[in-house]
Amino acid sequence: MAVFQLCTIQGIGAGMGGILWSGVTACEVRAAMALARVPLAEREQVARDAVFMGSEVAAERNRRAAAEAKRRNK
């Protein structure tokens, strides 16, 4: 969790003020693991977990944005 908290959820401007959330990058996870001093033997699993958490957060943000856009267009 400490590694994930050091990462930023990446987003891409999707026009008209929208953002398409994409999760965390592998480069950012590697840097966060170095900062958190994750032992080498644990890095592969920690990286998988951090990327998974990032994709879940991005998916939820995208779901919320889609629901808000749908609500506005009614």
Image: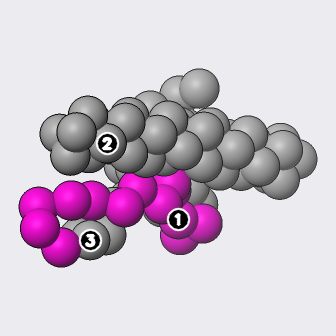
Residue flagged by tag 2: what amino acid is it? Lys
Residue flagged by tag 1: what amino acid is it? Thr
Per the image, label 2 sits on a secondary structure element best described as: helix
Q: Is residue 45 left or right of residue 38?
A: right
**Residue designated by label 3:** 14
Q: Is residue 2 left or right of residue 74?
A: right
Compared to residue 13, the image places residue 65 above or below, namely above
Q: Position of residue 56 (x, y in %)?
A: 60, 39
Residue at 31% x, 42% y is 70
Between disc 3 and disc 2, the foreground one is 2
Few, some or many C-alpha atoms within 10 Å of disc 1 (few <14, some 14-19, many ≥20)? some
**Residue designated by label 1:** 25
**Residue designated by label 2:** 70
Residue at 77% x, 49% y is 48
Magenta-drawn segment: 15-27
Q: Is residue 46 left or right of residue 28?
A: right
> Reading the chain from its start, which is encountered first: label 3 or label 2?
3
**Rounded to the nearest whole Å, what is the CA distance between mark 1 and mark 3?**
18 Å
**Rounded to the nearest whole Å, what is the CA distance between mark 2 and mark 1?**
29 Å
Q: Marks 2 and 1: CB-CB under 8 Å?
A: no
Few, some or many C-alpha atoms within 10 Å of disc 2 (few <14, some 14-19, many ≥20)? few
The single residue placed furthest to the right in the displayed view is 41
> Reading the chain from its start, which is encountered first: label 2 or label 1?
1
Q: Position of residue 49 (x, y in %)?
A: 73, 40
**Rounded to the nearest whole Å, what is the CA distance between mark 3 and mark 2?**
16 Å
Look at the image and tell me whether residue 50 can be seen. no
Q: Position of residue 2 (x, y in %)?
A: 53, 28
Residue flagged by tag 3: what amino acid is it? Ala
> Reading the chain from its start, which is encountered first: label 1 or label 3?
3
Residue at 22% x, 39% y is 74
Per the image, label 3 sits on a secondary structure element best described as: loop
